Structures are given as C-alpha cells and as structure tokens.
Image: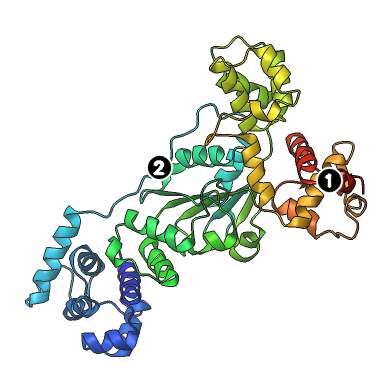
Amino acid sequence: MNADDFASLLRGARRVAGMSQQMLAERAGLSVDAVAALERRRRRPRAATIGALADALGLSGADRERLVGAAVVSGTDGIEPGARMRDREQATLNGTAGAMQARPRPVPEELPHDVVGLVGRERELTELASRVDPDGPRDPGSVPIVAITGVAGVGKTALTVHFAHRVASRFPDGQLYLDLRGFDPDRPPVPSGEALARVLPALGIEPAAIPDDVDARTALYRSVVARQRLLVVLDNAASANQVRPLLPGSPTSVVLITSRNRLAELVATDGADHLEVDPLDGTSAAALVASVARGVTLHPQQARHIAQLCGHLPLALRIAAARLVVGSHRVAELVEALTDARRWRTLDLGPHSVSVRAAFDLSYRALSAPAQQLFRRLSLVPGRDFLADVTDVLVPGLGHDAVDELMAANLVEHHPTDRYRMHDLLRSYALECLQLDERTGARES
C-alpha cells in the first residue's frame, strides 16, 4: 500500500457511509479543507486524526484495519521513520498493522477451467498479448480494455479464458470472472448493480458494507481496485452500459470483455480495443474435429468434410465431434445428418445443453422486427455475399439501419469490397426462420 491507497480508501469509505466531506469533517473534528486534501493526496494523514476519521466513519473490524493500516504503511506527517509515538493512536496503529499482516487482502482466482483442444487461434492470442502489454502503444493512465466479439458459437469465451490462464501470473492481485448472461435462454442479463454486489465480496468487502446505490457501488469498487494489478474477465456482455460500471479506473488492471454484439460504444467512448473472432480456417477446423474426436477412427478427408458442413464454427464442430465420441453417430451417419433437415437436431445435445440453433435463436430474438425480417429474407439471396442495395428489393423502404443492426449483432459481416456476407449456418437458420415466421405470400412479395 501507499499514500494513494489511504486517499482512495478514505474517499470510498466516506461515500459508502453516505457522507459529504463537510459531514465527515464535522464528525472527525477536522476542517473541510483537511478532508479534501487527504482525499486528493495533497497531504499525508496525521497520526492523531486517523482514529478520529475511522470513528467518524463508523469503521470497525477489517474495514477499520484496512484504512488505518494504509496510513501506517504510507507514513504520517510529523513522524520520522522509526520514531516512537507516545499517544494512544500509536498503539492502535501498530496493532492494526500487525493484524493486517496476519490477515492479508483476499486474492480472487475465479477463472473457469481452460479449454482443451484450442486450435487455430495463434493470431488472436498474439493480438491479445500485444493489446494488454503494459509497454505497448497506449496512452498513459488509460485502462487496457479489449472487446472480443463474434457470431454465436465462434469460441469467444474459450479463446478469452485460454488467454487469461496464459497471463494470469502477471496479475498478482488476482483474476475476476463474471458471466453477465447477456444472451442466456433462461435468465435475464445481470444488472450492473448485482454484478458489483457479486464482485466486491471477492475483493474483501463485507456484504453489509456494500451500498444500495449503483453509483456508490461503482465508486467503492474503483476505490478498492485502484492501483491493484487485476485481470477482469466480463463474459457474455449484452451492452456497453452493462459493463461500464465494472471498468476499473486504474491502468494497472486489464479488462477482457466477450460479446455477440460489437460493443462499438466501448470503442468510441471508453477507449476499448476491438478484436473480432472469425470462424476457423479449414485446416484448423478439421484439426479441432480430430482433437475432440480423439480415439475415433477418422480420416483427414472425413474431418475436413465434417468441418465444412459445420461451417468451421467451433461450437458446431465440437458438438458434431462429440456425437462421434459418445457413439450416437458413425462418421457416415453424421455426415448424412449434417446435410439434410436433421442438421439442427444433430447440432443440439439436448434440453438445457449446448445447441447451435439455441445460440442463434438468442441473437435473432434480440433484433428489432425490421432487422428480423431482413435477416430472414437474406436467406433468399443466391451466392455467399450481397450488396447493401439488395435490402431495398427484399424489404422495400427498409433503409440501411437494419443492415447496421445485423452487423452490430455479428449476424452479417462487411467486407472491404463493400459487400456483405452471412455465415453458411446462419443462412440455413435464416431460411428456417423464413419458413416458420412468414407466410408464403409475404415471402414472395
């Protein structure tokens, strides 16, 4: 700890207590200027005032020890290093320092287990390493934030967790992990206030000390993690607003965010880097099938064929390979099932389990009605890509907002040639949605 820690802890404790600087000054017998100077790091705390501040804030137990201990480690005005203090506060400070050394701040280690068989992600791992490098090209004081986005099932979480395990040793104050449930079939997204209430206890804050107000929780969170070296992984985010209160204010921490949405607002207003995760190339996709289906006799050409039928999408590849491992399908049967109407049933491991169609459903249902209509009708476009003008033919008078919405949701990708493309599995899914959601007359309009 250092003097900055004392200032941050004092400010955070005051906000948690719901006090203004004026109120704290009156209760502690200090001037408002003195409290303001301590919080702004313009002066170091005097030994005689530390106990008064703790009493005025109503601090006890670990919270009091943390504040007083920060003052001990940072030093106090008017006391030479090693000098003996003769007042009651010296005994309090020494006792608290010893207690803090005996009971250190908790170090969260919340990362899920690493994924077995991650292949074909060398480029993404290299890019992530460069973007969180403390010596990399970044403005001083800015928090390293990376938004890792891509279509449902492309393996964003697997990539992020794997990378987090690689660099975990660089973050001695721990790793936080939170599934924000931005696209969950059974539960709503986690509100920011609830997310903070889950994170703060892992950082040593007693549940009773967590304020009710979201802004106060955010201030407390940022005060606690200030100058700590933390890795924060926010998985499955729905929007920039959902994650913004969970962003530390200190550049010593790194934040990795995964989402199906592109989170352009984080890039525009919070300085986040953006990493788009694409489906695997053919060679890597076949290697993933072979890796998951280890122990199954599978010729390279068969692995490549299965990979192609799965559109090189990691979630589909893993499900298809799992079918071979558990013996529910022979290779020839699996290939046949992936080429006909059984495709979606084959790429579904059962209720409340992993399913490609269920993953697509969540992204589709989150769209506005015009964007849903355009998405369905894009399945009628011949070929793999299309120009933006085709939207006027498919849905007259729609405009380009719906195309932008599909891009933001990673359901359509834009190429430098000014053409757009939809993943093969998404096109098949869109055609099924068309058949289910629109009448024949509407499809022919």
In the rendered image, which residue does mark 1 sit on?
439
Q: Nearer the viewer, mark 1 or mark 2?
A: 1
Q: Position of residue 435 (x, y in %)?
A: 80, 40
Question: Residue at point 68% right, 30% down?
Answer: 344
Position of residue 108 relative to residue 290, above or below, is: below
Nearer-N-terminus badge (1/2): 2
| Mark 2, other Cα within 10 Å: few <14 / some 14–19 / many ≥20 | few
What kind of residue is marked 2?
Ser
Check disc 1 and report its element: helix, strand or loop. loop
Q: Is residue 198 visible?
A: yes
**Residue nearer the viewer, 297 or 334:** 334
User: Residue, x 14% and y 59% (percent of image)?
Assistant: 98
Residue 134 seen: no
Q: Which residue is rendered at x = 11% and y = 64% of the image? A: 95
The one of 375 and 282 positioned closer to us in this rendering: 375
Q: Compared with residue 42, is residue 230 higher up or lower down, i.e. above or below?
A: above
Q: Which residue is mark 2?
A: 169
Q: Secondary structure at mark 2?
A: helix
For this rendering, which residue is in front, 424 or 279?
A: 424
Residue 14: where, in percent of width, then height?
Answer: 32, 77
Q: Which image quadrant for residue 437?
A: top right
Q: Residue furthest top?
A: 297
Q: Is residue 314 left or right of residue 392?
A: left
